[in-house]
Amino acid sequence: FSLSLAGFVEEPERKYCFECDSKEQCQEWIEALKRASYEFMRRSLIFYRNEIQKMTGKDPLEQYGISEEARFQLGTHK
């Protein structure tokens, strides 16, 4: 499978090619890359932040002064 990275100033059309021994190994790579994405981590942060808030009644990020940042609020991206 291949991965194209568009939008990077240094290398706007960079393409990475991966080879795997099996279809299962290919799927493992794809899933690992998805889990490493910004959007996956952002959604994980939102989920766990809400779960902690439900359990404790407190925003776990408030102590870091980022509780009001819109990018961490639910509903800003889908």
Image (spheres, grey):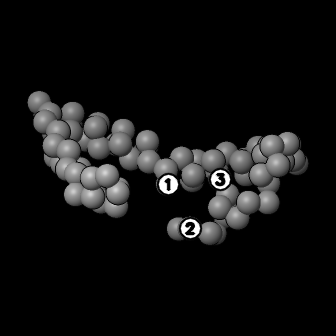
Residue sitting at x 11%, y 30%: 21
Could you tell which of marks 1 and 2 lies nearer the N-terminus?
1
Could you tell which of marks 2 and 3 lies nearer the N-terminus?
3
The residue nearer to you, when weighing 78 against 16, is 16
Residue 9: percent from left, percent from top: 35, 57
Tags 3 and 1 touching, CB below 8 Å: no
Residue sitting at x 43%, y 42%: 36
> Disc 1 designates what residue?
39
Q: Identity of the amino acid at label 3? A: Ile
Q: Is residue 38 left or right of residue 67?
A: left
Residue 77 badge = 2
Residue sitting at x 53%, y 68%: 78
Residue 58: percent from left, percent from top: 87, 47
Question: What is the secondary structure assignment of the residue under circle 3?
Answer: helix
Q: Residue reaching furthest front?
A: 10
Q: Residue 21, relative to residue 5: is it above or below?
A: above
Tags 1 and 2 touching, CB below 8 Å: yes
Residue sitting at x 17%, y 39%: 18
Image quadrant in which you'd find residue 56: top right
Q: Identity of the amino acid at label 2? A: His
Q: Is residue 39 left or right of residue 59?
A: left
Estimate how packed mark 3 is, as few (under 14), some (14 to 19) or many (20 or more) residues with alpha carbons within 10 Å: some
Residue 4 shows up from this direction? no
Residue 8: percent from left, percent from top: 35, 56
Q: Residue 32, relative to residue 13: is it above or below?
A: above
The residue nearer to you, when weighing 70 against 44, is 70
Residue 46 badge = 3
Could you tell which of marks 3 and 1 lies nearer the N-terminus?
1
Image quadrant in which you'd find residue 67: bottom right
